[in-house]
Amino acid sequence: MAKSTRNLWPDDIGISSLRAPVTILREQAGFLSDKTLHIVEGAVRTKTSDENKFLHTFYLEAPALDRYRFYLFSIEHDTNFYPLNILSEEGQSIVAKSEDDFTTQLADLFASEKTKKVIHALIAQSQT
């Protein structure tokens, strides 16, 4: 008679209260799209590496300009999420040590003069 194997996984293994950084990025992409009436949209693309790292890239896209895409920044993290690296267009790296730190850094990036100038330029060109 075959012996049955019992399930060794804990009951709470399929439940997570963690919020992935990519979730935050996608939410912010949606907020940008809503705020600009979809004239400029946020887009997030994800790649993985052989070193168990995730790379999420945040773009500004202008649908009316043949989906023109402007690289704004990337984030890189492993399966533990934090600390994560925020990589700017200029090649600068900022370390976010927690979700709160990450959202603070994102707010600063989104409010920067450079980001606002690019968004304003894309809106102006899209409305011609």
Image (tube, grey):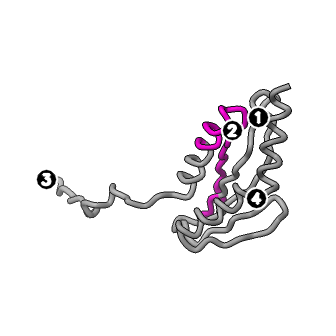
**Of residues 9 and 15, which is closer to you in this image?**
15
Neighbourhood count class around disc 1 (C-alpha, 10 Å): few under 14, some 14–19, many 20 upward = many
Q: Which mark is residue 112?
A: 4
Residues under numbered marks 3 and 2 in contact, where contact means CB atoms less than 8 Å apart: no
> For residue 11: magenta?
no
Residues under numbered marks 2 and 1 in contact, where contact means CB atoms less than 8 Å apart: yes
At x 78%, y 27%, the residue is 64
Q: Looking at the image, is mark 2 or mark 4 earlier in the sequence? A: 2
Amino acid type for the residue under numbered disc 3:
Met
Q: How far apart in space, not on screen, are marks 2 and 4 (Cα)? A: 17 Å
**Of residues 105 and 22, which is closer to you in this image?**
105
Neighbourhood count class around disc 2 (C-alpha, 10 Å): few under 14, some 14–19, many 20 upward = many
121 is higher (above) or lower (below) than 8? above
Q: Looking at the image, is mark 2 or mark 1 earlier in the sequence? A: 2
User: Image check: 19 left or right of 21?
Assistant: left
Q: How far apart in space, not on screen, are marks 3 and 2 (Cα)? A: 61 Å
For disc 2, the marked residue is 41
**Element type where label 3 sits in the image:** loop
Amino acid type for the residue under numbered disc 4:
Ser
Q: How far apart in space, not on screen, are marks 3 and 1 (Cα)? A: 65 Å
Amino acid type for the residue under numbered disc 1:
Ala
Q: How far apart in space, not on screen, are marks 4 and 1 (Cα)? A: 19 Å
At x 69%, y 50%, the residue is 58
Give the residues in magenta: 30-54
Residues under numbered marks 3 and 1 in contact, where contact means CB atoms less than 8 Å apart: no
For disc 1, the marked residue is 62
For disc 3, the marked residue is 1
Q: How far apart in space, not on screen, are marks 2 and 1 (Cα)? A: 6 Å
> For residue 42: magenta?
yes
Give the foreground label among 4 and 1: 4
